[in-house]
Image: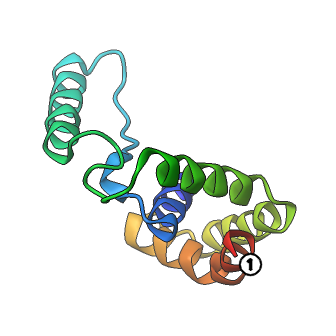
Amino acid sequence: MGVSALVKKVLKDVGIREERYSLQWASAAEAPRFVQLITKFTAQIKELGPIGEAEGLSKEELKARIDKALAAVSDQKVRIAFGNATKVVRKDAVWTNEHIGGIVNEKMEKSLTTALG
């Protein structure tokens, strides 16, 4: 869940719709759930249209923003901040998406802002 919160934050910070990312769990025994998740996500992406289009970005600007996002998540300070955020999540032992997202946002704001410069 922490990685999901990080990916959504980075996408949002670089101006790409965070709805383009989804991480859901389904076991091999949950075929109907898997089909439902994929169908819903596919419809959501079709509604948004090609990446960059919904964001109003040219192909060049989109590539620049994706490159910036990749560089940010590869940054050592960002990775350390993420490790520290996960320690807080484990200590709190509250496993809701809202709580984890709040911790990730709070603990990573400075390092991500610097890395995304």
Circle count: 1
Circle 1 packing at 10 Å, graded few (<14), some (14-19), many (20+), is few
Residue at horizontal 30%, vertical 53%? 19
Which residue has dot 1 on it?
114
Left or right, residue 43 beside residue 4: left
Expressed as whole percent of the image width and height from the top left, the position of residue 4 reads 49, 53
Expressed as whole percent of the image width and height from the top left, the position of residue 97 reads 40, 64
Colour convention: rainbow
Task: Residue 96: tell me if it is visible.
Answer: no
What's the residue type where badge 1 is placed? Thr
Decide which of 41, 102 is in the foreground and name it. 41
Which corner quadrant of the image does residue 76 belong to? bottom right
Which corner quadrant of the image does residue 51 belong to? top left
Query: Element at badge 1?
Result: helix
Decide which of 105, 69 is in the foreground and name it. 69
Residue at horizontal 67%, vertical 74%? 88
